[in-house]
Amino acid sequence: MAEVKLEKEENFDSLLRRFTKRVQQEGILSEFRRRGYFEKPSVKRKRKRAMKKRQTMRHVT
C-alpha cells in the first residue's frame, strides 16, 4: 500500500501529487487493472517477458 506522510507546512496539492507518483511507481493501478479480468496464460507470458526486457534495458543504460 502506498503511504505518504504529511510534511510540515505542505499543502494538499503537493501531498496528492506525491501520493499519485508513489502509486504509479509501485504499479498499484496497473496491478488492479490486470486483476480485473481473466488473462490467458500466453498473454501473461508475453507481459512478463516484456516487463523483464524493460527492466534489463533500464539497468543497462
Image: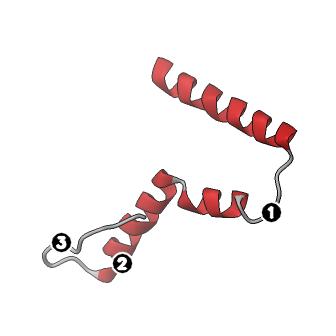
Q: Which residue is mark 2?
A: 13
* Of residues 38 and 24, the one drawn nearer to the viewer in this rendering: 38
The type of residue carrying mark 2 is Asp
Image side of residue 51 versus residue 21, left or right: right
The tag on residue 37 is 1
Image side of residue 9 versus residue 12, left or right: left
Q: Which residue is mark 3?
A: 7
Mark 1 vs mark 3, CA separation in Å: 38 Å
Res 4 → quadrant: bottom left
Percent of width and height locating residue 58: 51, 27
Crowding at label 3, few (<14), some or many (≥20) Cα neighbours within 10 Å?
Answer: few
State whether residue 20 is above or below residue 31.
Answer: below
First reached walking from the N terminus: tag 1 or tag 2: 2
Of circles 1 and 2, which is in front? 1
Q: SS at mark 2?
A: helix
Q: Work out whether residue 23 can be spotted.
A: yes
Of circles 1 and 3, which is in front? 1
Confirm or deny contact between disc 1 and disc 3 (CB under 8 A): no
Q: SS at mark 3?
A: loop
Res 44 → quadrant: top right
* Of residues 41 and 17, the one drawn nearer to the viewer in this rendering: 41
Q: Residue at x 40, y 64 (%)?
A: 2
Res 43 → quadrant: top right
The type of residue carrying mark 3 is Glu
**Residue at the limit of the structure toward the bottom, as seen here:** 12
Of the 4 image quadrants, the one containing the N terminus is bottom left
Q: Residue at x 78, y 34 (%)?
A: 46
State whether residue 31 is above or below residue 50.
Answer: below
Q: SS at mark 1?
A: loop
Q: Work out whether residue 61 can be spotted.
A: no
Image side of residue 52 versus residue 15, left or right: right
Percent of width and height locating residue 12: 32, 81
